[in-house]
Each structure stands twice: as C-alpha cells, then as structure tokens.
Amino acid sequence: MQTNGRGGTRGARRASRRAVVGAVLGAGLALGSGLGGATPAAEARTGGAAAEVAVDRAAVRAAPARVPVGSRELFVGDFETGDFSQWGQCQAKNLNKRCRTIGAGNEQMRIVPAPDARQGQYAARFNIRPGDVPPFGGGERSEVQSNAAGALVHEGDERFYEWSMKFPEDFPNPRGVWFIVLQWHSSSGSPPLAINVERNGDIIIGGDGLKGEPRRTLGKVRRGEWVDYVLHVKFSRSRSTGFIEGWENGVQTVPRYNRAAMKDDENYLKQGVYRDDGPATWVMQDGLRVTAP
C-alpha cells in the first residue's frame, strides 16, 4: 500500500557503465544502446584490442539480442552529482523536504562513493529501520521522488527504465505485506505499478493500486551483489493497450505481456525502500535512467 505522499562527466559515467556491463554480460550483451561487444570495425580501429579481452567470437554471434532501450533520454537519477539533487522530494523518518536541501544525505539515505557504486562515482544507500515513518504517516520508508517532466508518464507513453540494485549479505526476506523498491505512483492510493520484494525473495513486477493485473518475476534477491535491470513499459489504463517486459543482468526474464499500469491521468516516479514493517536493513540503488523510443 502507498499513500500520496554528476561528480563525473557523462562520458566518464558511460565509460564506467560499459566496463561493468561488459563484466556482467560477457559475450557481447549490453544494457543500453552502444554498450555492446566490439564489432569487427571497432577492432580494426583499435588495432585488435578486442582480442585482448579474449571474447569468443562464436559466443558473441550466438549471444541473445542486446537489451533494447530508448534513443531519447528523458530523466537521469543516477546520483552522479554526488548528492540527491537530481530528485525532487526526499522522504524518510523526520524527513519530507526537497532533496537539494539534504546534500549527500543523512542516516536514512546517503550517497556512497566508488568503489561501492555500481557505475560511475556514486550510488545511494537507503537505510530502513522499524518505526522509520515520515511526518505525513503511512508505512516505513526511505525514498526519493521525482515529478520532473521526464519522470512523469501519461496514457500511451512508452518508456525504458534502467537501474541497478544491491541488497546486503544478511538481507532478510520481507515479513510484511509489502516491500517496494521502485514505484510509479498515481495521485492517491497504492501504486498501479511497482517493483516489489516478496516474502520468498522474488523481485516482482506488481502494483497493488490495480487489482487483478498479472504479476511477473524479474528475478531473485541476490544478496551481496549488484544486479542490473531494464523494464520496458507502455503505460495505459487499458490492459489490452499497455504492456511490460523486463530483463535481469541482460537476460529477458519477463517476456512482453499485456497489463494496465495506470489508474488515472499521471504516474510519478519513486525509488528507495517503502514497506509496512520489518527489521533494520538497507538497499543500494544506482544508475537509474529513463528513455523513450
């Protein structure tokens, strides 16, 4: 349930992302456009440098198609500013204010530097403890929110979302009713679309704001390691019009399926941790990027 409530240069950020994606996806898969394995032309330009990483060319040819993302970048919330200023509102215990006022954060949410980041120089760690309820009430949360134009979606919008998450080695499976790490929120009530962590450790595409919509599993909680995700969504109040598909570490774990993802005119974006109850824990998030075709 839910109530209403760039340290480095862009080139450096993308160079770092290429490096980590290459390590995760191996034989030529990529998260995002232009991040795949070297082509023969690229090898020629670099004097055969691609051979030095010992990528098996047959494996590259046999690899699945690269993960699609949009060509138009609309919103970036990857914390590469070294603070929370890319986001609009920060919400946690005793906190509900503009993110630009909290700098690199506090005990509820804070920026962590490389080498703990997934890409670039910075990531964000969202800490959550029993009783961490913000001033406006609701459940326990440590979240950032954006109502920027590029983070908002309306009927018929098609979007790609790239982001990475890391859970601690001792992360306990949720014991409550909901544990949300990413949500597309409407004007009131529960979110019509959300990424939830279930009691069995599944990371699912859910959203309690719409009853009866099918849920799909993106993957499992992988404790102690960064995991990369891509979600492709067409937003609609109509199940026959809207669709979702998803990837975990470059592998499509959720083939395209139809479902509604809106219940009114607009969804805004939130990231972090929002739950009903549970023990103290944290989730790290990095690299969020929103694109459109």
Image: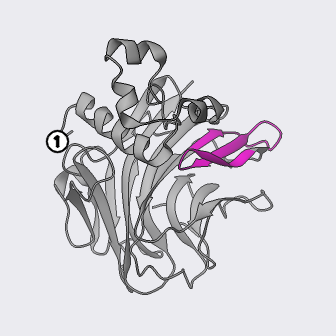
| Residue 160, x across and y down, in percent | 55, 37
Residue at the farthest right position: 240
Say what amino acid the circle numbered 1 marks: Gly
Secondary structure of the residue carrying numbered label 1:
loop
Could you say where residue 103 lies in the image, as x and y percent from the top left? 16, 55
Query: Is 6 included in the stretch rendered in magenta?
Result: no
Q: How is the image coloured?
A: one colour
Residue 21: name its quadrant.
top left
- The residue depicted at 24 percent of the width and 51 percent of the height is 122
Q: Is residue 184 above or below residue 12?
A: below
Quadrant containing the C terminus in the rendered view: top right
Please give the range of residues in magenta.
Answer: 231-255
Question: In the picture shown, does residue 248 fall above or below 107?
Answer: above
Magenta residues: mostly which secondary structure? strand
- For the residue pair 122 and 177, the one nearer the viewer reads as 122
Can residue 255 be seen? yes
* Residue under label 1: 7
Q: Nearer the viewer, residue 189 or 26?
A: 26
As drawn, is 14 to the left or to the right of 55?
A: left
Picture quarter containing residue 77? top left
Give coordinates of residue 135: x percent, y percent. 34, 73
Q: Is residue 3 visible?
A: no
Q: Is residue 249 magenta?
A: yes
Quadrant in the picture for the N terminus: bottom right
134 vs 118: above or below:
below
